[in-house]
Image (cartoon, rainbow, N blue to C red):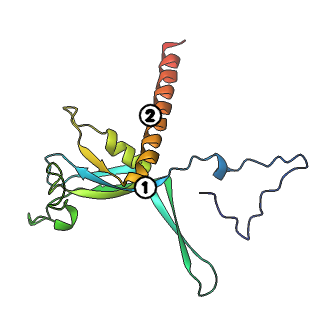
């Protein structure tokens, strides 16, 4: 989402030939926000995962006494912690954090966390345990699946290209 122009900063001024200066908010890649449910499939009763990046929420008031607008943005700064604990400190099941009985059999009663940061969704989707089994199941709304699929595909392609270039530099070619 483009950054709002405030009173303290001027709008982008074009030169006579129509060129405008490139600003950081134009070049910085924007990570889309999609609300997903990530279900932990592993055996641990108390599992937590900390990942770099977080969701920043800004509130803007339209006019004095007017409606407030909330803007969410995924940022690289900070850390997000996801708690997949299924039991509390006394050993009791935390019903609010477990999948309902109406879920598919493989997910019923499993702990879950809501995840909005798409880079974190990508991590959970691709993560495997030591035996190369999926450790998490990602659930998303059908209307978000295309955007999720496209994000994972393009970021993985970019990572493969970057790894190839690094291997070439290390090999000295």
The residue tagged with tag 2: helix, strand or loop? Answer: helix
Closer to the chain start, of discs 1 and 2, is 1
Vertical side of 27 occupied by 173: above or below:
above
Q: CA distance from mark 1 to mark 2?
A: 18 Å
The residue tagged with tag 1: helix, strand or loop? Answer: strand
Furthest-right residue in this view:
16
Residue visible at 70% across and 65% down in the picture: 5
Q: Quadrant of the C terminus?
A: top right
Q: Quadrant of residue 89?
A: bottom left
For this view, does 39 lie left or right of residue 11?
A: left
Furthest-bottom residue in this view:
65
Residue that badge 1 annotates: 34
Residue visible at 25% across and 46% down in the picture: 136
Which mark identifies residue 156? 2
Q: Quadrant of residue 99?
A: bottom left
Residue visible at 64% across and 52% down in the picture: 25
x and y percentages locating residue 171 in the rendered image: 48, 13
x and y percentages locating residue 132 in the rendered image: 22, 32
């Amino acid at each position: 989402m483009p950054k709002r122009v405030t009173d303290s900063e001027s709008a982008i001024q074009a030169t006579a030939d129509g060129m405008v200066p490139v600003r950081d908010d134009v070049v910085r890649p924007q990570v889309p926000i999609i609300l997903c449910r990530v279900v932990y499939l592993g055996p641990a009763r108390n599992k937590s995962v900390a990942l770099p990046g977080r969701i920043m929420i800004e509130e803007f008031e339209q006019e004095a006494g007017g409606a407030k607008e909330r803007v969410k943005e995924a940022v690289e700064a900070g850390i997000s912690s996801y708690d997949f604990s299924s039991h509390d400190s006394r050993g009791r099941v935390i019903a609010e954090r477990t999948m309902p009985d109406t879920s598919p059999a493989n997910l019923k009663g499993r702990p879950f966390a809501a995840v909005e940061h798409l880079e974190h969704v990508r991590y959970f989707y691709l993560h495997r345990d030591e035996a190369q089994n999926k450790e998490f199941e990602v659930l998303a709304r059908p209307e978000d699946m295309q955007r999720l699929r496209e994000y994972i595909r393009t970021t993985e392609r970019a990572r493969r290209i970057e790894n190839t270039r690094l291997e070439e530099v290390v090999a000295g070619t």
